[in-house]
């Protein structure tokens, strides 16, 4: 009996939707220059909460940031690969096995797209015609865009972490002279908004952990009438999402949520 409809086009359409969603999240996160991120930031928060349950050792504080970023990168790579594989799969006989000339199996589609995204070519499969080969060029360009912007995203994130640690070193050496670093604190706050994934990085030295130390620095200065420190603190990424009206309470919850130290299960928050 002939089926009522062919599922292949539906799979292809789902692949297009998946690609649009993934690339939108990727572009907003990597070049959005703000703390908005539809999906990636949520994956990062979940990964961060999981990884910080590890024992509080120096190794954990060294690797937790890279692990969180790697989790997000994995989401982007797998989603883009799956989306394009679904698009090709939705086109009948688009990819064939080089040895037999028969249509590739699902693994073959994923493998074919993986080679295209990595721009290395090769593989055991090939496009069935010139139109599919042209579509493969689009996949290769997509892979170059993801690779280029991902490298830029990682560099921006790590540079923000380094700038934050440099400022903490200065404040640790000169605790009584705040005004000269007011501009630097404002600059770091702006950098964190452009690269909020820097908040997930920690350090084996507690004095070099940017989110925790920033919360302490602002908390100590709220009573200073000469400077509106609360106005500056409100610009910290995601602080506005806490419902508390008292700035100190909001800041302490923000500090707890972005601390890489282990927290009691009953006090786990949602960063």
Image (spheres, rainbow, N blue to C red):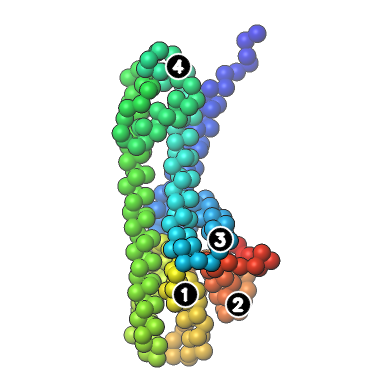
Q: Earlier in the sequence, mark 2 or mark 1?
A: 1
Work out whether 146 lies above or below 8. Answer: below
Give me the C-alpha separation between circle 1 and circle 4: 57 Å
Mark 3 or 4, closer to the camera: 3
Residue 27 horizontal/vertical position (percent): 41, 49
Question: What residue is at 41 percent from the left and 55 percent from the top?
Answer: 32
Q: Are marks 2 and 3 in contact (CB under 8 Å)?
A: no
Q: CA distance from mark 2 to mark 4?
A: 61 Å
Quadrant location of the N terminus?
A: top right
Q: Give the left or right position of residue 234, taking residue 167 as reference.
A: right
Q: Which residue is mark 4?
A: 103
Q: Find disc 3 in the rendering and name its residue.
A: 54
Which of discs 2 and 1 lies nearer the camera? The answer is 1
Q: What element does badge 3 sit on?
A: loop
Query: Residue sitting at 39 percent across and 83 percent down?
Result: 172
Q: Quadrant of the C terminus?
A: bottom right
Q: Which residue occupies the foreground of this view, 78 or 29?
A: 78
Q: Nearer the viewer, mark 1 or mark 4?
A: 1
Task: Give how far across and how far down residue 100 sits, in percent.
Answer: 40, 12
Residue at the extreme top of the image, as rendered: 1
Q: Residues within 10 Å of mark 1 (few under 14, many from 20)?
A: few
Q: CA distance from mark 2 to mark 3?
A: 27 Å
Q: Nearer the viewer, mark 1 or mark 3?
A: 3
Rendered image quadrant of residue 245:
bottom right
Residue at the image point whose x is 53% and y is 52% from the top:
43
Q: According to the image, label 1 marks what residue?
A: 206
Residues packed near mark 3 inside 10 Å, few (<14), some (14 to 19) or many (20 plus): some
């Amino acid at each position: 009996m002939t089926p009522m409809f062919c599922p292949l086009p539906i799979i292809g359409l789902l692949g297009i939707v998946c690609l649009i969603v993934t690339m939108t999240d990727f572009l907003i996160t990597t070049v959005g220059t703000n703390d908005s991120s539809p999906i990636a930031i949520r994956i990062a928060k979940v990964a961060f909460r999981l990884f910080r349950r590890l024992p509080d050792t120096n190794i954990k504080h060294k690797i937790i940031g890279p692990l969180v970023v790697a989790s997000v990168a994995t989401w982007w790579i797998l989603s883009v690969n799956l989306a394009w594989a679904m698009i090709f799969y939705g086109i009948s006989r688009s990819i064939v096995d080089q040895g037999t000339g028969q249509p590739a199996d699902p693994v073959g589609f994923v493998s074919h797209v993986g080679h295209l995204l990595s721009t290395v070519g090769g593989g055991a499969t090939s496009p069935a015609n010139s139109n599919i080969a042209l579509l493969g060029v689009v996949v290769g360009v997509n892979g170059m865009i993801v690779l280029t912007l991902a490298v830029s995203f990682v560099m921006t994130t790590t540079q923000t972490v380094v700038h934050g640690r440099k400022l903490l070193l200065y404040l640790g050496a000169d605790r009584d002279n705040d005004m000269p670093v007011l501009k630097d604190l404002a600059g770091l706050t702006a950098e964190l908004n452009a690269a909020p994934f820097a908040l997930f990085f920690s350090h084996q030295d507690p004095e070099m952990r940017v989110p925790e130390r920033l919360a302490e620095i602002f908390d100590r200065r709220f009573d200073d009438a000469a400077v509106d420190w609360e106005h500056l603190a409100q610009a910290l990424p995601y602080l506005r999402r806490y419902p508390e009206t008292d700035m100190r309470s909001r800041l302490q919850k923000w500090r707890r949520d972005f601390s890489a130290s282990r927290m009691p299960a009953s006090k786990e928050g949602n960063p």
